[in-house]
Amino acid sequence: MRILILLIFAAINCFSQTVDSLLYQLKNIPNDTERVNQIYKAGFELRNSNPEVAYQYALVCEKEALKTNSNKHLAKGYNLLGVLFFKKGDYASAIKFQKKALKLNQAAKYNLGIAINQTNLGNIYSELNYFNQAEAYYLKALEAYNTLNNKLQITRCLMNIGSLKNDQKQYDAAKMQFKEALVYANEIGDLELISDCNSNIGTNFINLNNLDSALIYLEEGLKLREMIDNELEKTNSYNNLAHLHILKKEFDKAKNYLDMSQTICDKYDYPEAKVELYGTLSFYYETQKQFESALIWQKKQVALNDSLQKIDKENSQLQFLDEDQSLSNTADEGTSRLWLYGIIGLLSIIIVALIIKRKHE
């Protein structure tokens, strides 16, 4: 019983420290620009895990930035709103906010912010398959990153352009971009980017039917992913190597890579990789004229892909708060959530404590 009481008091103490919402605390930072920086940072970190809450932060960020009379800080709020609308699938709104942020950063002559907005606009237009507009923004961003000598962002920008070329089946041009990105990735020593560049180059060589060169780059990419223990990305390497060995009629090697990919997909329940795996399995059986098996895997691929697209569509239908809604209500909602989470956590601790006590009895 003593353990239970101690756990309850510990939970209450912990809960009391988190009752005040983070947003409320950030809004009370005395320095205007630092307040905006911290609200933006917190909202940006939530963009994937909780976009609805991130949207609340973005609105507060915009409101607080207006107090600073700083174009650079107001641009942060608009950039975050643009990112969130992009994730929602509202590309018109995403473009509007990114262009507003870009204009403000240009007025402030804030080159890093300018490049970030241009990169984000490139991403939006790329998603819309507006390839010319996307490339134009990526090239402008690349120019800014070169001016700043920001090698990390140069690498990523070159990879974006390479992916854009690849989507247009301009495989030689894509390969050139990825090879240039690889030079920068090696300079900064980012193993993850190096492995991605090698993998992309290998895939381009497959598309160009240069299988021997493709094998060299794909194996190098896999080796690096094994070094950094990137389990999920290894499935991409396994699938690409399986595809290559199928083309070379080396079916035993291909099946070995497919089995390794299947193991990781099942272990981590990785549906996106399964879509790729199922497609490669279908190709594996089709090449050996086992058409019934090929059809089974093709149907599985189509069904899973449709399911994922449906989930993405549902997730994109985020009901963001109306911008005219009182921000005080936003803070109250955040506090209410904290109370709910705290109560749930407290009950969980009590239940666990009772179970532990029961075991000792």
Image: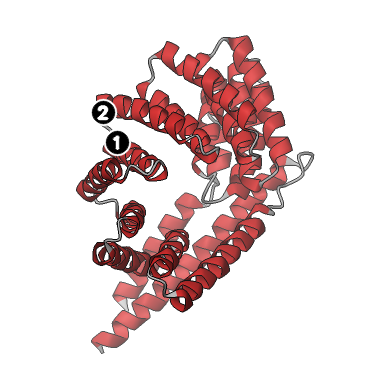
Q: Residue at x 34, y 82 (%)?
A: 355
Q: Position of residue 301 (x, y in %)?
A: 51, 67
Q: Badge 1 local density, few (<14 within 10 Å), some, or many (20+)?
A: many
Q: Residue at x 37, y 76 (%)?
A: 352
Q: Dot 1: what SS?
A: helix
Q: Is residue 333 above or below residue 169?
A: below
Q: Quadrant of the C terminus?
A: bottom left
What is the spatial separation of the Cα atoms under label 2 and label 1, in whole angstroms?
A: 6 Å
Would you say residue 68 is visible in this rendering?
A: no
Q: Position of residue 273 (x, y in %)?
A: 42, 59
Which numbered marker is on residue 166? none
Q: Quadrant of the N terminus?
A: bottom left
Amino acid residing under circle 1: Ile
Query: Residue 35 appears in which quarter of the rendering?
Result: top right
Q: State the residue position of label 2.
A: 186
Q: Residue at x 61, y 59 (%)?
A: 309
Q: Position of residue 327 (x, y in %)?
A: 71, 40
Q: Is residue 31 above or below residue 319?
A: above
Query: Residue 69 appears in which quarter of the rendering?
Result: top right
Asked whether 220 or 109 is in front, the reply is 220
Q: Dot 2: what SS?
A: helix
Q: Is residue 316 above or below residue 292?
A: above
Circles 2 and 1, Cβ within 8 Å, touching? The answer is yes
Q: State the residue position of label 1.
A: 194
Q: Which tag, 2 or 1, sits closer to the chain's start?
A: 2
Would you say residue 247 is visible in this rendering?
A: yes
Q: Residue furthest bottom?
A: 361
